[in-house]
Amino acid sequence: MITGKNYIGSKLVGSHKPFKTFNPKSNSENPYEFYEASSEDINKAVAIAKEAFYTYKNISGAKKSEFLNAIADEILALGDELINTYTQESGLPEGRAIGERGRTMGQLRLFANLVAEGSWLEASIDTAQPKREPLPKADIRKMLIPMGPVVVFGASNFPLAFSTAGGDTASALASGCPVIVKSHPMHAGTGELVSSAIIKAAKKTGMPNGVFSNLNSSGIEVGVELTKHPDIKCVVFTGSFRGGKALFDIANSRPEPIPVFAEMGSINPVVLLPEALKSSSDSLAKNLAGSITLGAGQFCTNPGLVLSIKSKELTSFSKTLSELLQDMDASCMLHPNIKRTYEQNQNEITSQEHISVLTNSPGTTEINFVEPQLATVEGSVFLKNPTLHKEVFGPFSLIVQCIDEEELLKVVKCLEGQLTATLMADDNELSKYPELVNHLLEKVGRLIYNGMPTGVEVCPSMQHGGPYPSTTDSRFTSVGTGAIKRFVRPLSYQNWPHDLLPDELKNENPLEIYRIVNGEYSQGTI
Amino acid sequence: MITGKNYIGSKLVGSHKPFKTFNPKSNSENPYEFYEASSEDINKAVAIAKEAFYTYKNISGAKKSEFLNAIADEILALGDELINTYTQESGLPEGRAIGERGRTMGQLRLFANLVAEGSWLEASIDTAQPKREPLPKADIRKMLIPMGPVVVFGASNFPLAFSTAGGDTASALASGCPVIVKSHPMHAGTGELVSSAIIKAAKKTGMPNGVFSNLNSSGIEVGVELTKHPDIKCVVFTGSFRGGKALFDIANSRPEPIPVFAEMGSINPVVLLPEALKSSSDSLAKNLAGSITLGAGQFCTNPGLVLSIKSKELTSFSKTLSELLQDMDASCMLHPNIKRTYEQNQNEITSQEHISVLTNSPGTTEINFVEPQLATVEGSVFLKNPTLHKEVFGPFSLIVQCIDEEELLKVVKCLEGQLTATLMADDNELSKYPELVNHLLEKVGRLIYNGMPTGVEVCPSMQHGGPYPSTTDSRFTSVGTGAIKRFVRPLSYQNWPHDLLPDELKNENPLEIYRIVNGEYSQGTI
């Protein structure tokens, strides 16, 4: 049941600044009233998170694993109410809601397994050498420890997988950090339901009150206040460049600066190499049309830029792709504001000089729906006009036609940091472009060969991050097991009494984890 | 031979803004004239570093290892000229110079071994599942790659081990990043000699020109210009809070913010527990006196704060320690400016209300020499006066006398981030203070039991870093193999042609490194 209140730990609180969510499909407000967190609520949530931290951080990986698995169970137990609320608050179809719920539960279980196993803590042991000359060597043992209360900003475009109990919350809780979610105002109801599942799971598995709180907001104030709070030790965010950069700047200007991992989007260049265009033009166009329009183009890995070399095949490919996009149904965007921004950004690009719009859509009469759009420009124009490098969040893509390989390389070199880049190539074709690949990989977190950037696999080898401005720190990821590294720091124990060491660092290796012992990998005892 | 010029790659350049180094022992300028790098020199050094990066990053770990070992060899081959220049430019004794040279070479060889072995790259492979339902799973492989040209700021207090070819340079070069050193003006001659060794080693082992440059500076301008340069991707610094924080702010306000790891010092609290004071007062005082005065107190792990509970044993310990310090010889500081700052900072603290100075030194007539000083204050005063929490870089320490365990815990909770904390305890005594340890470890990067914080072991398990303001990012270290992680970021390859994958990610595992394959640690093939 949705109450519209904030969870301050297990307590439901709220009567301040009411607001509602919006159903873009029916173009009407949803019935529930939500209450924004007050300053008092924020301070209370942080205070209990801080208190909870001193017990939660010392809870075993096995117990944390139970907690994370219980969250997944409780989310499933929310049943249809969750799915219906999700679709009402996002305009996304039921199938997507069910799929995203599965992914969310999968992420929770992935981190549950990771912390139950325990090797992720990077335990490292250098034993003493009391007789070393000229000085004896002390016993030194190191492992990762959690940093403290974390603020997670829910994303607009993934009401489950990148929100309340999404990958950020799952990885932060797994690391041993209490979490305060700044709920996304567009899906506050979905957020409250998921929060109720987390609170239930925390109670069932005996976690301290304050390990999780969920705060509503209608504007930016709650997030800003949380980011400035001296007892918050890390902030993670998925959303716009403007939002992420603002939080980064706030966090860095605190008396005690704290890390912000903001994933701020990307135009995800797709490079079509000449042979691939010759042999697979139609299937490339079909796959790309699907990727551009997936989820109404509202994916951070949406392919917003297609790079290729001028040829009759490229002209024909462009025509095919534009026709495919033209023939596709209009799709509902997440919110009227997002639709408005999409149209503004798209118009900003298509109104630049020397841009040709290739799609010629009839227009849709459905409110909050949009049609995909494709435009094209010459490489020389793209090189000179940075406006064309901007992300258009929605089903829009720009084909850049380079005169030759040299210009293509120049275009690659002028790109800003991206989450992904994709290379479409024929058999053995890619090996002819070592310089292109060598430069392209400097711009991205993930390189894809003959596939689509949309669809981010959640697994240990996934990097979902990339050089600025796609994120604020390319050394971290928000998807995959590596996401946990954002919330931890190494601590060394020197000559520490053996009985008082954490289990991870004891000679007997009771958790049977992989460790680095005197520089060698080992799962054994000492 | 010292020319006073800058190394722009292998080229010696300089005629701009001459300056000299200073011998604090003889209180006179050293003979050589150095030339500050001009804007043109800076741009040239960065341009060739950027160019070198595109080849250097792809050089094998085995070849990089040769380069690092060759640097160590060439440093040793500099012979007495290096040792003499070091002592002339620092006032530190020859034994220290020889010891620090050994440590510097040891660090280079440590990283040489690390990259020759290769597992540090955190290779991770998730193989494809083409038949997975509802969607096939792509093959995804991840490893760490270097970020690009790095600026290393040489530290004043370690002319070798934390300077030109110190741990920062060794770890950055090991990671695959070209390095530009902003040489410390106090030991520009030592810096040039070491740079000549690096350049020789680079030539001998076939490294690209631009992989290393060394720029002189007499003020802050060169460092600021380097930090602002768009082609610099990371900055590392060891020095004052003021300097490190300024670079951090500059880097964050760039159009493209970049990571800065600044190690900015610490007061390294030493907690004396009651039983330890009863049983080992004299040896504690002796060891602490040695640690406080080591290197004239000019170590970032110098114990500047002693915390304990009031007792007659503490009074007696304080008396013994002050007498030991009083009896010690005065020692030469690195530079007249450092001596001046030491005296200012020490006076600032000792002139606060309710502070008692315990040492009563006769004063030294030797210019640039200082005597150690010990002061004491009640816990309640320390809690209220943040001035007393400041670092005094030099042989100074403050004993805080708490009325009871509760006040001791309060003092620990009010501390800022530190590199280390030390607990002095009798057998089984530490186990009686779980809350104290639980809070103390939140403040530090390294916890030491019955040992001294000075003497930072260079090994895989060392953490030399800590919460702000001891560093700008507690997730990284500047000492030990972990230091390499500051310069690298993960890159994922999705469905990449097997032949074009880096060796680290090939099925055959030709480098025989440890990898995570489908979530399991493995040194095997696929």
Image (cartoon, coloured by chain):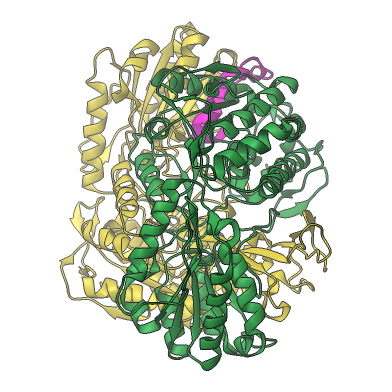
Chain colours: A green, B yellow
Q: Is residue B525 magenta?
A: no
Q: Is residue B10 visible?
A: yes
Please, is residue A132 above or below residue B501 in the view? above
**Count the marks: how many?**
0
Please, is residue A315 above or below residue A255 in the view? below
Q: Position of residue A357 (x, y in %)?
A: 41, 75
The image quadrant that residue B47 belongs to is bottom left
Q: Nearer the viewer, residue B178 or B63?
A: B178
Q: Nearer the viewer, residue A162 or A351?
A: A351
| Horizontal relation, residue B336 to residue B298: left or right | left
Q: Is residue B425 magenta?
A: yes
Please, is residue A50 above or below residue B492 in the view? above
Please provide the residue range marked out in magenta: B419-448
Q: Position of residue A440 (x, y in %)?
A: 51, 74
Q: Is residue B5 visible?
A: no
Please, is residue A82 above or below residue B45 in the view? above
Q: Position of residue A133 (x, y in %)?
A: 62, 50
Q: Nearer the viewer, residue A409 or A106?
A: A106
The quarter of the rendered structure image containing the C terminus of chain A is top right
From this viewpoint, which residue is outermost toward the left?
B17
Q: Position of residue A228 (x, y in %)?
A: 38, 32
| Horizontal relation, residue B109 to residue B420: left or right | right
* Residue at the spot 42% in from the left edge and 17% down from the top edge: A40
